[in-house]
Amino acid sequence: MKHERRDAFTAEITESTEGCYPCDLGVLCGEYRNAIAACSGNVIGPDNQLAVSHATDNFQLQAPGLVNISPTLYYLWQNTGTSANVNQSGTVTAGSATLTIIDQAGTTVYLANLGDTGTFQSSAGLAGGWTIRVELHGMSGTLNFRVQKP
């Protein structure tokens, strides 16, 4: 499978034909602390106004006006707590959008359809570097969610 790796600091893009998994990309293995991996399909481009606020204990992503987008995005987020509050307020008008949050130990603590709106609580997990994965399949609409330490 062909994929791209974008370094969020430099916007440098590299391509390969490896499998699409965060550690295969080096994204979550300490090489890039704040990176996006886009795997197959249409990617989120500058016209989509992707806005990411990425700070310890507070993560937010917004991307309006998406049309038939199919990347998978990965972020490494530092959570000093053992759970997270997740606020989802986007709209999915076509396709699917899934948010998965994985704690420092590799345990999935949150899995949800981003078409569902509201405020939700993750399961308890190990503090440290948490993976935020957003999987989009032919998604149209607006992504908008926040993940915060309670």
Image (cartoon, helix red, strand yellow):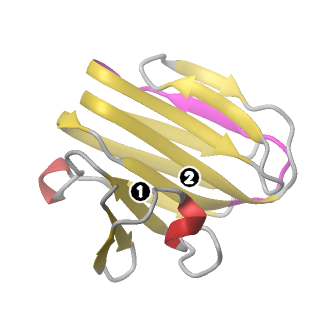
Are circles 2 and 1 on residues that touch, CB within 8 Å? yes
Q: Name the residue: 48% across, 18% down.
A: 117
Q: Name the residue: 36% across, 24% down.
A: 96
Relative image position of residue 46 (x, y in whole percent): 16, 59
Residue numbers of the magenta segment: 78-93
Q: Is 86 inside the magenta-drawn segment? A: yes
Q: Nearer the viewer, residue 119 or 97?
A: 97
Q: Nearer the viewer, residue 94 or 57?
A: 94
Query: Mark 2 — residue?
Result: 59
Q: Determine which quarter of the picture holds residue 20.
A: bottom left
User: Identity of the amino acid at label 2?
Assistant: Phe
Pointer 1: residues within 10 angstroms few (<14), some, or many (20+)? Answer: some
User: Identity of the amino acid at label 1?
Assistant: Val
Q: Determine which quarter of the picture holds residue 85.
A: top right
Relative image position of residue 77 (x, y in whole percent): 63, 60
Looking at the image, can residue 88 be seen? Answer: yes
Pointer 2: residues within 10 angstroms few (<14), some, or many (20+)? Answer: many
Mark carried by residue 52? 1
Q: Is 17 inside the magenta-drawn segment? A: no
